[in-house]
């Protein structure tokens, strides 16, 4: 027999503010469009892995954004691809106590620099699986962030490598 915990009025009010969960099991909150072609290896090609990080755990992803902005300003066609936990960097819903606010100075540096990067012509991709693994919703991505199928990560790297791109990879965890 399950025992129901006794909740205070404040605990009940907190539970009732926002319905949980907002979507039923099986509801789709991610698109299925694969953005990049399914490339196959050509003779002599090599593979370089990409990596991820999250802004509030270290400076890894923030520095990656700053480097991309710098490359873009040097005239490089620049793109950022966030995957795994790194996809959380692309959420427009970051902030506390409300969306977009900063509890402490710099809390939203990543979002602000990503917005600047997009505004200046950079492309930002976010892996849908990275979002899903952490309960984040595609609809909460920052404006201009392109959601990608999990299989796109490798093919994005192949596409940019074939263009002769400088590929900077980061990893955290």
Image (cartoon, rainbow, N blue to C red):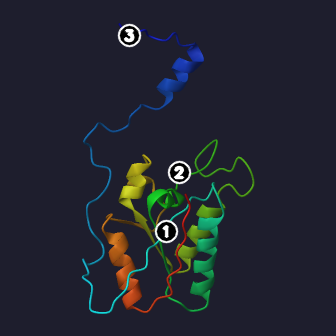
What residue is at 38 percent from the left and 34 percent from the top? Answer: 21
Image: 16 above or below 135:
above
| Label 3–label 2 contact, CB within 8 A | no
Identify the secondary structure beneath mark 2: loop
Among the 4 quarters of the image, the one containing residue 65: bottom right
Identify the secondary structure beneath mark 1: loop
Note whether residue 108 is visible: yes
Depth check, front residue: 116 or 159: 159
| Label 3–label 1 contact, CB within 8 A | no
- Check disc 1: other Cα within 10 Å, few if <14, some if 14-19, many if 20+: some
What residue is at 52 percent from the left and 75 percent from the top? Answer: 169
**Residue 93 in the image, given as x and y percentages of width and height:** 53, 51
User: Residue 51 shows which numbered tag?
Assistant: 1
Left or right: where 154 falls relative to 69: left
**Residue 103 in the image, given as x and y percentages of width and height:** 71, 46
Counting residues from the start of the chain, the first of labels 3 and 1 encountered is: 3
In the picture of the structure, the residue carrying the numbered disc 2 is 93
């Amino acid at each position: 027999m399950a025992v129901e915990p006794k909740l205070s009025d404040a605990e009940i009010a907190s539970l009732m503010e926002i319905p949980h969960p907002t979507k039923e099991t099986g509801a789709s909150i991610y698109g299925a469009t694969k953005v990049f072609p399914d490339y196959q290896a050509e003779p002599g090609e090599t593979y370089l892995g990409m990596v991820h990080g999250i802004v509030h755990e270290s400076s890894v992803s923030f520095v990656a954004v700053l480097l991309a902005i710098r490359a873009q300003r040097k005239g490089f066609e620049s793109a950022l691809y966030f995957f795994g936990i790194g996809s959380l960097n692309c959420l427009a819903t970051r902030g506390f106590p409300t969306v977009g606010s900063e509890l402490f100075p710099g809390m939203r540096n990543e979002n602000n620099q990503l917005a600047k990067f997009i505004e200046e012509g950079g492309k930002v991709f976010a892996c849908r699986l990275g979002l899903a693994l952490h309960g984040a919703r595609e609809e909460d991505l920052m404006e201009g962030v392109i959601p990608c199928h999990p299989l796109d990560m490798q093919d994005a790297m192949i596409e940019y490598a074939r263009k002769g791109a400088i590929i900077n990879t980061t990893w955290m965890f």
